[in-house]
Image: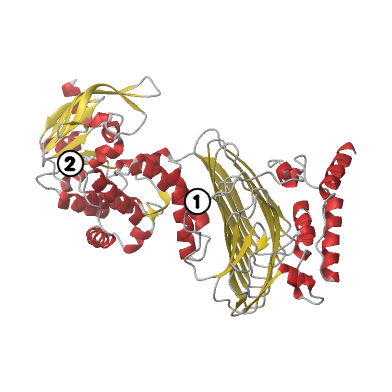
């Protein structure tokens, strides 16, 4: 599904290398987790994959189902099936959440040459999915993320993911700022979307989220590279011993 | 002294060819008084404090600059609204194109007819609010309008007026120089909606005086647009009574020079006065100016000024807004926001927000910002698959939303929103 080879990325405005030759393959239908200390480049990886400005790829490649991601505009990556759940979802005053969702869904359908969803069909689908995530009608009407609590924002990200049905979902520290109940709700939303044709890359600091979203593979990232890869037990090791042991072991 | 002489010479030169329309004795006196006010104040020059950001020379020149006729070839605005239509072609009432000037709960007359009557309620309004509005800031172009206005309507709402009254302006003469003066008197507990749109003339001066009695409600939605060479100055003077409501919204699109002045005075307790505007401008020759002055002279008044400007490609926007809270006007709630979205580095926004408060128990806030499209929000939308072009337009529309929300009627708001979308689409 996602194949990253030797990816090197620096900041556009500064001479600062963040990713230093990252290799990562996420197979179709699998859930991979990336853990790592602060500053290891986890969020940068998610931004570079989704096409945010401000980064310069100096070497390497990233492909989604064989297509060169790095050559695409952010909206083309989305239409190709990539989705990033933001660590800090953006507030957009003046744009209703429903309008936003519908614009996004139909823009992607259009880009893929599919017919746009009718207002009625869209409404039916969004209501059903919102209900599962305990998102009420008021949240759908309000401007995108404006006045939403931390938990509401994250649930709103998962709602977007559910509506857009991407192939490759990247969750960037989706657990940050969530209490236990909210995390469970978000995790349930993600788990409901797990399927044979869909892959996940879950970026997190803590093992906690991985209790709820069980990964197939766990990677440890440090200083711009994947330094260790293993099964779910690797996350437990981090939880019990911190990163220092692992980093010491691989250095 | 030399400057004052220069100013009075320029004023005399401008007034040399002016003749005042004849009417009943009271109206002749009102016009003569207005002309005297113009002479006493002198016509504005860019040296005047309130014309610092807007050069009035094209508005004061003896000859109106030529303006090409523009036919957008689209359905006129508010066409689907069930309304009472009053048409002016280059500033002249067109009876054939207009509806009958009758309606439930309302009396409507042509200005000239009202001004010819020896006894008429218009006597207590024509030029009266304009005169009050000359202090503390002089507005000589409004006085000139009162002196020379050739046409217009006078509207008296006595009840809840069922249909909006729609003033439709048409421009058919490339050199027309129109001066219209309209009066609206909203009686106690009455309600009326006034719509205005269309290119009025090559150069246009419009003056609207509105008196809202206790418990009355006045709703005004205006669109200035699609005539690319428009030069216009408008003034709205309003005085609102206890528990009354005044709401005015203006959309300005294109044009060369637009100055919209609004002077509101809250004289009764628990009244509401809102004035809002959206302007979208493209190009070096676009200049748009909102100059607003709201006076609170009663208890528990609420006023809002909400102005949003989208500017690109060298366009200039100006906002001069003031809230004056007089002594004793306690519990005043005054809000003022003026914001510009600068779509490139060449556009500019000049803002002068002012507060002057003489009461000690009030809540007044004001803010003014200039900014570009929020790149973070743009990326967020694009990461969800919305193409850059659509995302930019969506964010531009969202920037204007707070001002559009000031329009109470959702159908009218939606129609203006559609026009704005069209404008953005034509320019992407």
Residue A104 in picture, x, y percent from top left: 30, 48
> Callout 1: 10 Å neighbours few (<14), some, many (20+)?
few
Q: Secondary structure at mark 2?
A: strand
**Depth check, front residue: B311 or A173:** B311
> Where, quadrant-wise, is the N terminus of chain B in this rendering?
top right
Q: Secondary structure at mark 1?
A: loop
Q: Residue at x 87, y 52 (%)?
A: B40
**Same chain assignment for discs 2 and 1:** no
**Depth check, front residue: B245 or B271:** B245
Q: Residue at x 22, y 61 (%)?
A: A128
Residue A217 in picture, x, y percent from top left: 12, 36
Tell me if A4 is positioned left or right of B356 in this view: left
Give the CA distance from mark 2 to mark 1: 51 Å
Residue B337 in picture, x, y percent from top left: 58, 51
- Dot 1: chain letter: B
Q: What mark, if any, has residue A200 been given in the picture?
A: 2
> Where, quadrant-wise, is the C terminus of chain B in this rendering?
top left
Residue B261: quarter of image? bottom right
């Amino acid at each position: 599904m996602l194949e990253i080879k030797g990816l090197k990325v620096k900041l556009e405005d500064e001479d600062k290398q963040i990713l230093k030759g990252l290799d990562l393959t996420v197979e179709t239908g699998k859930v991979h987790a990336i853990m790592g200390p602060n500053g290891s480049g986890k969020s940068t990886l998610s931004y570079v994959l989704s096409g945010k400005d401000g980064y310069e790829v100096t070497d390497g490649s990233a492909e989604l189902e064989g297509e060169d991601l790095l050559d695409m505009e952010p909206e083309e990556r989305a239409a190709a099936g990539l989705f990033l759940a933001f660590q800090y979802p953006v507030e957009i005053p003046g744009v209703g959440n429903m309008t936003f969702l519908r614009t996004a869904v139909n823009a992607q359908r259009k880009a893929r040459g599919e017919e746009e969803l009718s207002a009625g069909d869209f409404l039916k689908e969004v209501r059903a999915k919102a209900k599962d995530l305990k998102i009420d009608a008021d949240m759908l009407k309000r401007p995108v993320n404006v006045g939403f609590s931390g938990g509401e924002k994250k649930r709103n990200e998962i709602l977007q993911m559910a509506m857009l049905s991407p192939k490759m979902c990247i969750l960037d520290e989706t657990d940050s700022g969530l209490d236990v109940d909210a995390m469970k709700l978000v995790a349930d939303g993600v788990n409901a979307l797990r399927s044979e044709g869909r892959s996940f890359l879950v970026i997190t600091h803590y093992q906690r989220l991985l209790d709820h979203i069980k990964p197939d593979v766990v990677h440890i990232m440090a200083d711009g590279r994947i330094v260790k890869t293993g099964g779910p037990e690797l996350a437990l090791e981090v939880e019990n011993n911190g990163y220092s042991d692992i980093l010491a072991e691989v250095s | 002294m030399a400057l004052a002489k220069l100013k009075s010479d320029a004023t005399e030169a401008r007034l040399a060819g002016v003749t005042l329309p004849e009417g009943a004795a009271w109206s002749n006196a009102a016009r003569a008084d207005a002309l005297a006010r113009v002479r006493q104040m002198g016509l504005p020059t860019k040296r005047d404090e309130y014309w610092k950001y807007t050069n009035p020379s094209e508005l004061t020149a003896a000859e109106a600059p030529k303006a090409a006729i523009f036919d957008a070839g689209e359905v006129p605005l508010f066409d689907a609204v069930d309304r009472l239509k009053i048409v002016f072609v280059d500033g002249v009432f067109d009876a054939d194109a207009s509806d009958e000037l009758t309606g439930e709960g309302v009396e409507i007359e042509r200005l000239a007819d009202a001004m010819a009557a020896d006894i008429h309620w218009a006597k207590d309004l024509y030029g009266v609010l304009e005169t009050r509005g000359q202090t503390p800031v002089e507005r000589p172009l409004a006085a000139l309008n009162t002196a020379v206005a050739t046409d217009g309507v006078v509207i008296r709402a006595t009840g809840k007026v069922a249909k909006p009254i729609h003033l439709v302006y048409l421009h058919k003469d490339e050199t027309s120089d129109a001066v219209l003066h309209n009066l609206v008197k909203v009686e106690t507990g009455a309600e009326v909606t006034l719509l205005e749109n269309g290119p009025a003339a090559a150069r246009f001066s419009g003056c609207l005086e509105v008196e809202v009695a206790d418990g009355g409600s006045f709703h005004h939605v205006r669109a200035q647009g699609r005539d690319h060479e428009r030069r216009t100055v408008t003034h709205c003077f309003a005085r609102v009574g206890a528990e009354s409501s005044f709401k005015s919204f203006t959309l300005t699109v294109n044009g060369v020079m637009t100055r919209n002045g609004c002077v509101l005075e809250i004289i009764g307790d628990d009244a509401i006065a809102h004035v809002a505007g959206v302007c979208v401008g493209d190009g070096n020759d676009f200049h748009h100016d909102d100059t607003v002055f709201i006076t609170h002279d009663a208890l528990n008044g609420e006023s809002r000024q909400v102005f949003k400007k989208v500017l690109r490609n060298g366009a200039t926007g100006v906002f001069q807004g003031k809230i004056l809270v007089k002594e004793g006007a306690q519990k005043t709630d005054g809000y003022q926001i003026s914001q510009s979205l600068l779509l490139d580095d060449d556009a500019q926004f000049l803002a002068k927000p002012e507060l002057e408060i003489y009461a000690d128990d009030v809540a007044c806030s004001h803010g003014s910002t200039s900014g570009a499209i929020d790149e973070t929000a743009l990326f967020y939308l694009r990461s969800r698959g919305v193409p850059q072009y659509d995302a930019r337009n969506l964010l531009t529309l969202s920037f204007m939303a707070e001002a559009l929300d000031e329009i109470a009627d959702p159908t009218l708001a939606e129609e203006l929103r559609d026009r704005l979308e069209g404008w953005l689409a034509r320019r992407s």
